[in-house]
Image (spheres, rainbow, N blue to C red):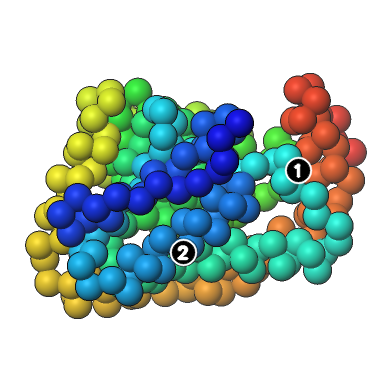
Amino acid sequence: MSEARVREEMDGNVLILTIDYPQRKNAIAPAVRAALEDAIERGHADKAVRAIVITGAEGTFCAGGDISSMDVGDALAGRERMRRTHRLVRLMARGAKPIVAAVEGWAAGAGMAVACACDTIVAAEDARFVAGFHKIGLMSDMGLPYFLPRRVSVGRARRILFYHEVVNAPEGERIGLVDYLAPPGKALEVALEKARFLAAEASGPIELTKKILSEGLDEALADEQTFQGLLFTTSDFQEGRAAFLEKRKPKFGG
C-alpha cells in the first residue's frame, strides 16, 4: 500500500501539488494535510513560485476526509484537530500566492472544501462536487460554510450542504461554484494556463486582494472549531462514522 503523500513539481514559476493517496481516493488524511501545509507554506515563501496549482492523482481530486482517522476522544481533542486543519485553510485563503484547483472526478466533503479555498476552480466537464458531511453526523468544515455561500449564494449553499446535492461541473459553472470548465482529463492543463496568467501579473495586488476577499474568515473558523469540536463528541458522529466504515446506512438518534 502506497504512503499518503503530496507530490511537488515546478512548471516554470508555477508549483504543482498533487494529492497522491489513491487507495483512499486522495482523502485528506492527517499526513496529506500536513504535507499540503508544508508545501504551500514553502511555496508562499519561495520567490521562484508565482502561483500554485492543486490537483489529485489518478483522476480524482479528493474524496473527502479520511474518516478512518477521525478517532476523536473529547471536545478539546476535536478543537485541536480543527485548529490544525484551519492552518491549511488560512495558508490557502490568506497566503501570498494565488492558488488554482484542477478538479477531475470527485471533489467530495473536505475535497470540495479544499477546492473552494482556492482562488480559482477549474473542473473537467465530468467532475462532480458534493458536501455530504451530515452523513457522518458532522457539519461541513475546512472553511466550506464560509467559502461556499460566497460562490453560490446562501440559499444554494443550504441545498448543497443540507441535502447532499451532487453538483456536476457544468451546473457548477452556471451557479458560480466552478470558474472554468475543461474537457475530461484536461483540468490540469487548463489550470496551468490560468496559473501562468496569474504568475505573470503583479504579485502585490493579488496578495492584498486575497486578504480583503477573505475578511471574516477567522471569525467563521473560530465558530467552526467550537461547533465541530462538539459534534465530534456526539453519539450521532460515532454512529455515522461506524456506518460509513461498515458500509451501511446510519441510524441517527438526534
**Position above or below: 101 against 98:** above
Q: Nearer the viewer, mark 1 or mark 2?
A: 2
**Of the pair 159 and 189, the residue shown nearer to us:** 189
Secondary element under disc 2, as helix, strand or loop, is helix
Secondary element under disc 1, as helix, strand or loop, is loop
Q: How far from the left and from the top, in percent, is residue 47?
A: 22, 73
Q: Residue at x 45, y 43 (%)?
A: 19
Q: Residue at x 41, y 38 (%)?
A: 56
For disc 1, the marked residue is: 137
The answer to whether marks 1 and 2 mark residues whose Cβ atoms lie closer than 8 Å is no
N-term-proximal mark, 1 vs 2:
2
Residue 130 visible from this viewpoint: no
The 10 Å Cα crowd at callout 1, few under 14, some 14 to 19, many 20 or more, is: many
| Residue type highlighted by circle 1 | Gly
| Residue type highlighted by circle 2 | Asp
Task: State left or right for residue 155 relative to residue 29.
Answer: left
**Position above or below: 252 against 143:** above
Q: Could you say which quadrant of the image residue 176 lies in?
A: top left
Q: Residue at x 66, y 63 (%)?
A: 82
Residue 179 visible from this viewpoint: yes
For disc 2, the marked residue is: 38
Q: Residue at x 59, y 52 (%)?
A: 31
- Location of the C terminus (image quadrant): top right
Task: State left or right for residue 160 relative to residue 213.
Answer: right
